[in-house]
Image (tube, helix red, strand yellow):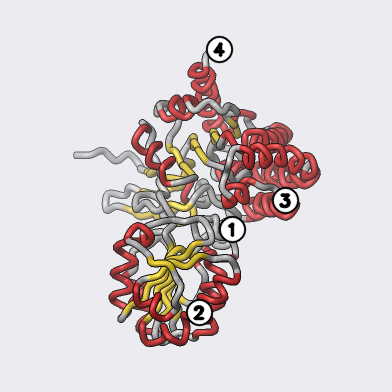
């Protein structure tokens, strides 16, 4: 069987499974997820051993430290995957929920009811936890899923998917509901993107170049997340001790993820007090600082930032720093160079907080909290299939509700249209 025929066969099976899964009972789906969590824990040693091979091959291939971190499984990360499955099992099932209902003057009763999207294709890089998170959310929302992970995590993803598939079969759900395309052949992605007859939506997770390439090639609708150029703005009315804790966390806690801070903006009124100790602490943690001219005057020795730096998602221990004269200047800067992902203001001024929330055009906006919270698990979704910077259908972390659409259910008593 050719690669194309093989992928078409997978997609056809997923479509058939989706029709069955759409009507699956909530308890059956929850039982499957709880069983899958137990199986992941039981297999954690084997999964980590398999993953170590992928990590070693990734290092030999020259993957960056950030990508190696994303690729690596640990006991804590396997446990996080398992907990994510259990959290999804606890969440309300969105399928069948009546979103709105009304009665027309002619007696027709119209309801807007949530239904699964159908078949979701997920194309992702490096992070093997996506295999479990995406599969769990799609299953709970009544969707079949076709997964295509990166070649750097091929063995790890295949092992995780096999554990999940065993749980699906044991629960009596359709076996083709969770499938992984386990080939490193890049043509597999192109074939997948042509299957608009069988796949309803593509969700890409990875670098901006991957997502743009998928969007340009796909016949299937794509929910994009181009980049995470996230900002933290330290206002003139900020609690500076709080600002230091938040900024340090947003940059250093896990720099290789899309919700990490890439640009730090500081009001001129507090820059002389805030920047020297903040920059010193960041540099001690290994962060390379690139600053505007005013930043460099306050902190000599900082490298000069150029226009490209402000628009770059580093995914590394690199931070661009800019001094601004006002809140409107900060908002305009974020809306100009940001990616619409996650942005925060640190302030004790209620009016400034409200203005920031109203005017910053991003999927998630924060007051006095780290942008690192933009995450399906942290938002209470159990997990996520991605973080959308789209405006249509879904925005921000994509959980169960974002994996559904709706249909209109109309009850009549013999009405005809005159």
Which numbered disc, 3 or 4, marks the residue closer to the eye?
3
Which residue bears the numbered disc 1? 377
Is disc 2 in contact with disc 1, using a CB cutoff of under 8 Å? no
Which numbered disc, 2 or 4, marks the residue closer to the eye?
2
Quadrant assignment, res 153: top right
Can the viewer see residue 383 in this picture?
yes
**Residue 356, position as x, y percentages in the image:** 36, 74
Viewer-proximal residue, 115 or 328? 328
Which numbered disc, 1 or 4, marks the residue closer to the eye?
4
Tag of residue 315: none
Quadrant assignment, res 362: bottom left
Quadrant assignment, res 190: top left
Q: In this picture, is 42 found above or below 263?
A: above
Separation of residues labelled 2 and 1 (CA atoms): 24 Å
Which residue bears the numbered disc 3? 74
Separation of residues labelled 2 and 3 (CA atoms): 31 Å
**Residue 357, position as x, y percentages in the image:** 37, 72
Which residue bears the numbered disc 4? 1
Local crowd size for mark 4, using a 10 Å CA cut-off: few (<14), some (14–19), many (≥20)? few
N-term mark: 2 or 1: 2
């Amino acid at each position: 069987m050719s690669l194309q025929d093989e992928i078409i066969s997978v997609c056809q099976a997923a479509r058939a499974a989706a029709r069955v899964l759409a009507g699956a009972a909530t308890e059956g789906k929850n039982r499957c997820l709880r069983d899958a969590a137990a199986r992941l824990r039981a297999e954690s040693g084997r999964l980590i051993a398999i993953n170590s091979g992928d990590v070693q091959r990734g290092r030999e291939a020259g993957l960056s430290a950030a990508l190696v971190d994303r690729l690596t499984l640990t006991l804590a990360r396997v446990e996080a995957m398992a907990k994510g499955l259990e959290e999804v099992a606890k969440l309300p099932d969105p399928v069948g929920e009546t979103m709105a209902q009304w009665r027309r003057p002619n007696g027709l009763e119209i309801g807007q009811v949530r239904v699964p999207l159908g078949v979701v294709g997920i194309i992702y890089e490096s992070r093997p936890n996506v295999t479990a998170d995406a599969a769990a959310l799609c299953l709970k929302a009544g969707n079949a899923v076709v997964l295509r992970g990166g070649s750097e995590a091929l063995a790890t993803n295949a092992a995780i998917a096999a554990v999940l598939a065993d749980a699906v079969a044991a629960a009596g759900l359709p076996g083709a509901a969770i499938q992984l395309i386990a080939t490193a052949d890049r043509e597999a992605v192109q074939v997948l993107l042509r299957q608009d007859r069988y796949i309803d939506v593509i969700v890409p997770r990875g670098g901006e170049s991957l997502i743009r390439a998928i969007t340009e090639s796909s016949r299937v609708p794509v929910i994009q997340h181009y980049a995470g150029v996230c900002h933290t703005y330290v206002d003139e009315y900020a609690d500076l001790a709080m600002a230091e804790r938040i900024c340090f966390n947003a940059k250093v806690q896990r720099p290789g993820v899309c919700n990490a801070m890439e640009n730090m903006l500081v009001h001129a009124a507090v820059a002389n007090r805030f920047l020297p100790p903040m920059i010193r602490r960041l540099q001690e943690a290994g962060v390379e600082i690139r600053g505007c001219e005013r930043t460099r005057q306050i902190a000599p020795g900082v490298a000069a930032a150029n226009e490209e730096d402000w628009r770059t998602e580093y995914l590394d221990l690199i931070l661009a720093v800019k001094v601004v004269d006002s809140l409107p200047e900060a908002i305009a800067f974020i809306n100009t160079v940001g990616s619409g992902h996650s942005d925060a203001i640190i302030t004790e001024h209620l009016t400034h907080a409200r203005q920031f929330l109203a005017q910053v055009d991003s999927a998630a906006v924060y007051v006095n909290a780290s942008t690192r919270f933009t995450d399906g698990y942290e938002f209470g979704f159990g997990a996520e299939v991605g973080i959308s910077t789209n405006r249509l259908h879904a925005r921000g972390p994509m959980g169960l509700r974002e994996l559904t659409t709706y249909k209109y259910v109309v009850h009549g008593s013999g009405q005809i249209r005159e």
